[in-house]
Amino acid sequence: MCAVVIGAGNNKVFEYLPNNFNKKKFLVNYGVPTNELLIKIQNVSKKQCLSNKQWPEIGQIKAWMVSAETATFMKCGGLGMVASELPENFNNVFVKDKHSISIVTPLYLGDTGKKKAELKNGIYVGAEGKSIKLKKIKTLKAEFAGKTKMRTFSFDVYTGEFNGVVYYFLHNEYFFSINPATDNPSGQTGCYVRNINGVDEVEKFAFFSKAVYCLLEDLIVNADKNIPVPNILIANDWHSGALSGLTKYLTLAKVYAKRMSQENADKIRNIPIIHIAHHMGYQGWDYNNTS
């Protein structure tokens, strides 16, 4: 069930959107929208984004590009091209000023029949045939509900460098296997397969966002010096969209539950997030199995 929040302060009203509103695409008009629901969503976005609050000034950029795809190791479209080419070109131009963008992405393993990825003897060969030498640097845990009760999942963090970009790969076999289920829809390929464990793309990338958050929390709370703490998060499309809510609100819930200090919560909450939206025409529409 989705809702639009109208108003502010004590005058907030939650107005629920119709069931299955995202199962039928609106006519896309890139000028002035005419659909009533789109106008309400747009107006809420304007109120939330257009404020007098100053954007932070960052002297030395140490950003993470958080992406489900990369053109280098798992490409399904332009989404992956942005994730690889933007950091590579940015680093090439600004390395002299010690600015950098690193890439955080899943470590996919398996064979869809069209794309294959494997990790052997520390060498990862991605689905696009390119290889990278990886070093496993830690194993972390993430609490995640998914479609069932809350469970704790472990995931491994690997790092390596390719074309002047540092990569951080996150791996959990349950979520990031790309071996397809027998009932995988024919239109879902690459990293978007419904995998052999029954994990579809929504559950897969919800876990990905939570794993990225857990890595970020670990670096800050435990003062880990092995990985530089980013001062910008670049969320590449919906796959990492949950990061905004996790960094801004889960942190507050943990402070309330006495599971995190206010100081550490503020450090996480104050990291700016740039959210890149691709293909506005999709409007949240997807297959029935990912509803």
Image: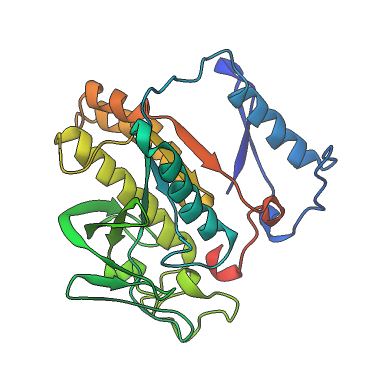
Q: Where 275 falls versus 158 (above or below)?
A: above
Kindly tell me whether residue 257 is visible in this rendering: yes
* Rendering colour mode: rainbow
Residue drawn 49% across the image and 69% down it = 192
Vertical arrangement, residue 172 with respect to residue 137, above or below? below
In the visual, does 215 lie left or right of 63?
left
Q: Quadrant of residue 161?
A: bottom left
Residue depicted at x 31% and y 32%: 251
Q: Residue furthest front?
A: 96
Query: Residue 290: horizontal and vertical position, in percent?
Result: 54, 65
- The percent coordinates of residue 63 (x first, y second) are 38, 38
Viewer-proximal residue among 167 and 172 = 167
Left or right of 230? Residue 52 is right
Q: At x 85% / y 40%, what residue is drawn? A: 34
- State the image coordinates of residue 154 (x, y, percent, origin top left): 21, 59
Residue 235 drawn above or below residue 50: below
Q: Position of residue 208 (x, y in %)?
A: 37, 55
In this rendered view, identify the residue nearer to me: 1 or 225: 225
